Every structure is written in structure tokens, then in C-alpha cells.
Image: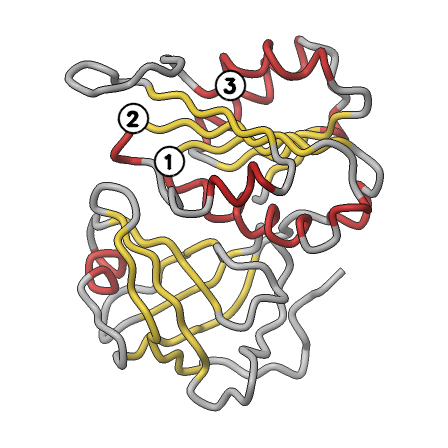
Amino acid sequence: MMIASMAEHYPRSLVITDVREQGRDIRSFDLMPADAGGSHGVGFIPGQVAMLQVNEEEPAYFAFASAPEDPELEFLVKRTAGASAAIFDLKPGDRVDLLGVTGHGFDLNQQLGSDLVFVAMGTGVAPLRSALRHVLSRKPDFGQLVVLYGARTPDDFCFRDETEDWEAAGVELRQVISRPDGHDWSGPTGYVQTLLDHVLPQLRTPVALICGSQEMIEQTRGRLQQMGFAAEAILTNY
């Protein structure tokens, strides 16, 4: 398991190297430490979050969307207020300060051989993607991989350019939207928790990784417990 090194010093200045449009009012940002060599050199585990600051805005927390072994750091930023709004408008070459890494993340080394069910809503897909990319880099170590991803509308799904790669790698991807009115959508509607009933009976040793709002996490945890999940088989990133 990778952990943040005690030798690391903060703050670290991160330089934006790329910006991509993702969901509605959501962008992904690739960043590299200004003092980095060939790779980012920031120690973290999937599911952990970074404390970022720009200019004089209050610092805010953003989950890593990249895997620890990826060459660059990546974050999803939704245009809201404060640091999120400030970062959202930045361009390649601009800088953001990394003040530290926190959260317990997902200890995936404890789940070797298990079927993994990734459950995410909205921008909660960021820590899910970090964990999924890490797992795919060592896929033989795990069982079946299932991604259940919910959003308000089809325009709110992120990383749409990657989902075909996930499926090609053997990931079962199921997506659901909660507000279908006015959208061309033939898939399931409702909340992401409703997808659990259709997937879990097919798995032998499932472990659930949940990423989303606190309300969504609690509702999903409750549904899983009703289905017989043990507490240790329900993982959250905070």
C-alpha cells in the first residue's frame, strides 16, 4: 500500500498541464509538481484527498482521480464556489498549491481475490476512478469488477471517453440517471443504489467501494447491509 511519505514537505506548487471538459460544469485538471522529475512523486493511496489552495481562497478538498502510479496528478473540479470556482477557471501553466494529503482511502491490498463493486454518484467518480485505474493495473489480483455510476442527467457523467476502455478491460459498467426528463436516455433511471439488486446476486465474494455524498453513502450502506453485507465489506473513502 502506498502512503504519503513523512519526508514530503508541503505546500508544494502544482503546475496545471492539461484541462478537459468532463460533465456539465465539471472539468478535469492534470497537474505536476513544479519541482517534479519524470513523475509526480506525491504519495497517496486511491480514495485519499488533497487539500488544494489557489490565490487567497480558503483551501478545499479534492479526491485524487488518478491512480498513484499514473505519471500525473488528476482532479475533478465542479464549478461551485470558493476554491472550486477559482480552480475551475484556471488554464494550463497556472499554479495551485498542494497543502497536504488526507483521508484513509481504500486499502485495496486487503481485498485481493475479491469481487469489487464500485458505487459512485456525480463527482464521487473521482476517487472511484483512482481505485479502478489502480486495480486495472493489477487486474489478475482481483475477481470481477463492477462499476455502478449514477448522475442527474447524461450530461453529468464524467470520463465518458474512458468507459469503453473499462468495458474492454472486463469491467461491467452500469449507469443510471435520476432526472431523465428532456434527455435522450434509454438506460435505467432512479438512484445508483437501485442497481445493487441486479448485480450483487451474481458475485461470490463482493466488496463494495462507495463514493458520493454523505447521504448517498449512508443510503447505499443501508441497502448493502439489508442484503447481508458485513461491515468490513463496505468501504468508503472517508
Which quarter of the rendered picture does the N terminus lie within? Answer: bottom right
Under tag 2, what secondary structure? loop
In this rendered view, identify the residue nearer to me: 62 or 191. Answer: 191
Q: Is residue 197 above or below residue 30?
A: above
The residue labelled by disc 2 is 152
Q: Residue at x 66, y 9 (%)?
A: 226
Distance from the alpha carbon under mark 1 to that under mark 2: 8 Å
Which numbered marker is on residue 122? 1
> Quick check: 33 above or below 26?
below
Q: Are marks 1 and 2 in contact (CB under 8 Å)?
A: yes
Q: Element under label 3?
A: helix
Residue at x-position 46% and y-position 21%? 192
* Amino acid carrying mark 1 in the image: Gly
Measured in 3D between alpha carbons, the distance from the residue under mark 2 to the one under mark 3, in whole angstroms, is 17 Å
Residue topped by disc 3: 219
Residue beneath the point at 60% across and 46% down: 132
Report the quarter where the C terminus lies.
Answer: top right
Seen as rendered, the residue at the extreme front is 168
Q: Is residue 140 left or right of residue 152?
A: right
Q: Nearer the viewer, mark 2 or mark 3?
A: 2
Across the whole image, how many numbered discs are drawn on residues?
3
- Tell which of 155 and 163 is nearer to you: 163
Q: x%, y% of residue 201?
A: 71, 11
**Percent x, y of residue 37:** 54, 89
Q: Residues within 10 Å of mark 1 (few under 14, many from 20)?
A: many
Give the CA distance from mark 1 to mark 3: 15 Å
Q: Is residue 6 above or below residue 83?
A: below
Dot placed on the residue nearer the N-terminal end, 1 or 3: 1
Which of the numbered marks, if any, corresponds to residue 177?
none
If you read the primary sequence from the N terminus, does the residue marked by circle 2 or circle 3 appear first? 2
Q: Residue furthest left?
A: 182
x, y percent for residue 154: 29, 29
